[in-house]
Amino acid sequence: MEHLIFLELRSFLDYHRLDHELTYWRSRSQFEVDFMVGDRIGIEVKSKSRVSPRDYKGLIALDEEARLKRKIVICGEKMRRRADDGAEIMPPALFLKELWIGNLVN
């Protein structure tokens, strides 16, 4: 799943000629975030069908350091929801739909 999301993000950025860097993030204490789009959007991909803040603690750590505009967790949950910490949790199909209609990265 992580590779699919990478390919879609890369394709979207190239297709729309957006100059956002696509990277990952790792802290000194080994927290990680799968994707950074520019310096304001963090995306974590999980294969679990239900996630909790413990599953995306890298996003939380990055947000404390960089004050992200958006924190997105893509996982196997059936419905979109917003966690108490502001993370947007959504299934892969919804993420891809939102990406390609321009609602996620601009």
Image (cartoon, helix red, strand yellow):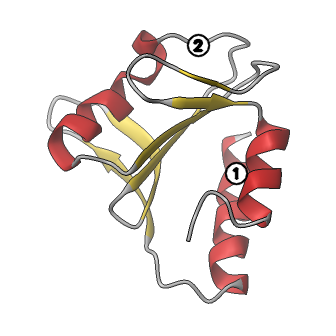
Residue 61 % position (x, y): 25, 31
Q: Tell me the distance, in whole angstroms, between the alpha carbons under discs 1 and 2.
A: 18 Å
- Left or right of 73: which side holds 79? right
For label 1, the SS is: helix
Label ID, residue 5: 1
Q: In the picture shown, does residue 57 fall above or below 4?
A: above
Q: Amino acid at mark 1?
A: Ile
Q: Residue at x 43, y 16 (%)?
A: 84
| Of the image marks 1 and 2, the number of the one nearer the N terminus | 1
User: Would residue 54 appear left or right of 39 to someone viewing this image?
Assistant: right
79 vs 55, nearest the viewer:
79
Measured along the vertical axis of the image, is residue 79 above or below residue 6? above
**Mark 2: amino acid:** Val
Quarter of image, res 48: top right
How far across and how far down the image is residue 26, in percent?
29, 43
Q: Quadrant of the C terminus?
A: bottom right
> Which residue corresponds to the image point at 46% horizontal and 76% vertical from the top-left?
20
- Establish if 77 lies above or below 28: above
Position of residue 75 measured from the top left corner of the image (x, y, whole percent): 69, 26
- Residue on which disc 2 sits: 51
- Left-right relation of 54 to 92: left
Report the number of discs: 2
| Residue 74 location, quadrant | top right
Which residue shows up at 47% across the image and 30% down it? 87
